[in-house]
Image (cartoon, rainbow, N blue to C red):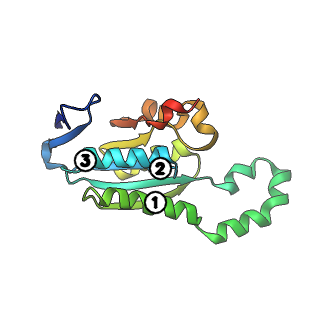
Amino acid sequence: MIILLFPESSSRPKFKYFICKSYYYGGKEIKVLICTDGSNFAEEAIDQAGYLLKHTGPEVTILRVIPDFEKRYEEYNEYFELFKGDIHRLKKLGTPKAVSKSLETGVKILENYGIKADTKVRKGRVADEIMKEIEEGNYNLVVLASYGRGISKFMLGSVSREVVHRSEIPVLVVKSGAGKNMF
């Protein structure tokens, strides 16, 4: 893959780059997986991905991984039995509205750059599900934020770090401007 990078403006103190042209050897299209957790950090990563990829005509999937409560509490038999009814009701409700909304927001952000995106929800441990999606989806690039929501942001991007170490394809980790003032 050849990527030509140019500064957005010579007057800006920080350079922001965009992909001018992208050629993929063998005629393969660029297939990108963008991961979100619905946080502002993830939205910034989606925005940066859109900005970088707007001239490449990529095939994009936005992925959101949610916990699989049934598997998560299965090993705690006494708790699982106690909450089995609640877990079953949660399962019947389907995808939470906040999850759907975060995916819709991601699609809208990319539409601003002329990029169409599909969405996908997986259940399980976040890094494991991202890795499964990478393998099953035959992607060329993964994009995710350096920090996530909740406690994970205080663990200095444990999901992004794990994906970087395990992935056999390029991973673009977008550092949030808000992350500088996090602590």
Please give the name of the residue rendered at 41% of the width and 45% of the height, measured from the top-left corner: 44
Can residue 108 be seen at all in this image of the molecule? yes
The residue positioned 33% from the left and 36% from the top of the image is 170
CB contact under 8 Å: marks 3 and 1: no
- Could you tell me residue 148's position as x and y percent? 53, 41
First of labels 2, 3 by sequence position: 2
Secondary structure category for the residue under label 3:
helix
Task: Let me know if residue 23 appears in the view.
Answer: no
- Helix, strand or loop at label 2? It is strand
Q: Give the mark nearer the N terminus: 1 vs 2.
A: 2
| Of the pair 132 and 91, the residue shown nearer to us | 91
Q: Quadrant of residue 166?
A: top left
Direction from residue 65 to residue 68 in the image, left or right: right
The type of residue carrying mark 3 is Leu
Between marks 1 and 2, how big is the CA–CA gap? Answer: 8 Å
**Residue bearing the label numbered 2:** 36
Marks 1 and 2 in Cβ contact (< 8 Å): yes
* CA distance separating discs 3 and 1: 18 Å
Amino acid type for the residue under numbered disc 2: Thr
Is 77 placed left or right of 68 in the picture? right
Q: Residue at x 48, y 37 (%)?
A: 178
Residue 46 lies, in percent from the top left, at: 38, 49
Q: Is residue 111 above or below residue 28?
A: below
- The residue that label 1 is drawn on is 103
| Earlier sequence position, callout 3 versus callout 1 | 3
The residue wearing badge 3 is: 53
In this picture, residue 45 sits left or right of residue 21: right
In which quadrant will I find the C terminus? top right
Residue 11 % position (x, y)? 20, 31
